[in-house]
Amino acid sequence: MDLVELIAEMAERKGIRVDSISEVEKIKTDSRTRWKCKFGCMYYGKRYSCPPEVPENFTEFIGSYRKAVAITYFFRDYMEDKRRMQELLPELESRLLERYPLAFALFPGGCDLCDECSYEKTGECVKKERVRPSVSSMGIIVSQFGIRIGDSRSVAVILLD
């Protein structure tokens, strides 16, 4: 099964309505996304997937990958559909490790895997092994994948090689 088929099949099983799956050779980063995190996002400092927990050397990290896949998807209920995608991404990453040993998923938005986030209260994440940095915390501007505010779509990224 090829990469796109695998992602589409696993997403469908989770009830995720995929818009597109695109292989990407170069992801553009911009430090302004981190500023938007710090000044304007309610998850800043409150989620393990978000700054300041996510290291600042994201440009170097993203630049070390030559290939990625962007998964854009539709949402009816932003929070519910985002959570489904966040549950799927570590599973996808795990399935890809044989082919891409350094595969690394990036969440659409701050982590919402738990009904109540322990990190916000205690500074300890109970699902650390499943949490991934958010796309924006890694300096990625989602508009490069065709996402526009208000169009009921979001994007997740898996860095491959």
Image: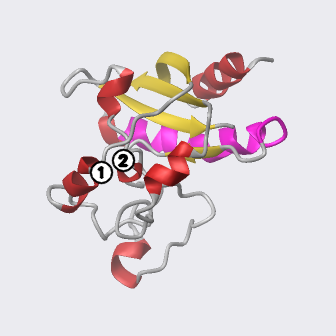
The amino acid marked with disc number 1 is Ser
Q: Give the quadrant of the C terminus.
A: top right
The percent coordinates of residue 124 (x first, y second) are 48, 79
In the image, farthest residue toward the left:
40
Quick one: SS at disc 1? loop
* Membership of 86 in magenta stretch: yes
Q: Is residue 64 left or right of residue 140?
A: right
* Membership of 157 in magenta stretch: no
Q: Which one is in front, 161 or 92?
A: 161
The percent coordinates of residue 143 (x first, y second) are 30, 27
Q: Residue at x 15, y 59 (%)?
A: 39
> Tags 1 and 2 in contact by the CB under 8 Å rule?
yes
The amino acid marked with disc number 2 is Gly
Quick one: SS at disc 2? loop
In the image, farthest residue toward the right:
98
Residue 148 to residue 132: above or below = above
Residue on which the image places disc 1: 31
Rendering quarter of residue 52: bottom left
Q: Which one is in front, 161 or 42?
A: 161
Residue 30 to residue 55: above or below = above
The answer to whether residue 4 is visible is yes
Q: Distance from label 1 to label 2 (Cα)?
A: 5 Å
Residue on which the image places disc 2: 139
The percent coordinates of residue 160 (x first, y second) are 66, 37
Q: Is residue 148 left or right of residue 155?
A: left
Q: Residue at x 28, y 55 (%)?
A: 34
Q: Main secondary structure of the magenta part?
A: helix
> Which sits earlier in the primary sequence, circle 1 or circle 2?
1
Q: Which residues are magenta?
A: 80-100
Q: Residue at x 35, y 46 (%)?
A: 136
